[in-house]
Amino acid sequence: MTTYSGTKEFEGATFVKASLKGATLRSSDVSGVTMRSVDVGGLDIDSHDLFFGSLVVNGVDVVPFVDAELNRQFPGRELQKSQTPDGLREGWVAVQSAWQTTVAGTPPDLVDAHVQDEWSLAQTLRHLILATDAWLRGGILRMQQPFHEIGQIFTGADEMGFDMSIFRADPPDYQEILAVRAERQRLVTDFLAAATAELLAQEREDPWGGGDWRPSVGDCIRVILEEEWAHLRYIRRDLPLLPSATDPRSGHRLEDTPT
């Protein structure tokens, strides 16, 4: 199968009676694409940025429906946008409880398993350590070097000039990941316990730099919550596809879970 990487040759192109059946688009820009009289049976779209725009199907913007359905599937997810200290505290408790269920229900032999090119559970937890480091320790607390060495950095960070020497080359043991993750969770819990409306309104620098956005402390917390819910959804999407998987919501083995 041919792979097109880093190309712009299809921008503005028109495909007529063409077959893209079974094609995979990953980390690609399909904004503004128009599809007419197309067969979309089994079309699977996953976009973290979906809620910042629109997705029109048969004349209907389905983004609000997707958002509402995810809120139904993940109780407390709607609080990731909260503007109050109490709302953010409640949202943090909800997402941590959901993560606890998923982590506890995952068999040890699956914590490093992958579905296609997606991150494993272990890698996902390492990325959430990185997200907390960036937005709490870096963005809010303004630590000069906020990152733990086992954090999982995003693809392409080295091309952006990020200092990759911060991170350990060899994958850490899962128990170490759980220990660092628990410590970072406590940092967020303790910070939110004392957070006030005045503190949440204070301005900070974007910890990743490179833009004009100056987030508030509340914005930084909301990014952490968005990361937590988004990656929980990814893991709950992928784990059931693995052999001998458990239901990541209940902890029951999938073959024992009523349908």
Image (cartoon, grey):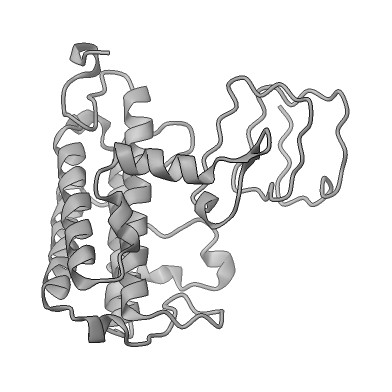
Q: Residue at x 66, y 24 (%)?
A: 40
Percent across and percent down for residue 249 are: 22, 32
State whether residue 213 is above or below residue 99: below
Q: Residue at x 38, y 49 (%)?
A: 230
Q: Residue furthest front?
A: 59
Percent across and percent down for residue 204 are: 38, 85
Residue 61 makes an appearance in the image? yes
Q: Residue at x 46, y 75 (%)?
A: 208
Front residue of this view, candidates 171 and 83: 83
Front residue of this view, candidates 178 and 187: 187
State whether residue 163 is above or below residue 238: below
Q: Is residue 24 left or right of residue 161?
A: right
The image quadrant that residue 85 belongs to is bottom left
Residue 149 makes an appearance in the image? no
The image quadrant that residue 113 belongs to is top left
Percent across and percent down for residue 156 are: 55, 60
Percent across and percent down for residue 5 are: 70, 46
Q: Residue at x 24, y 86 (%)?
A: 198
State whether residue 13 is above or below residue 146: above
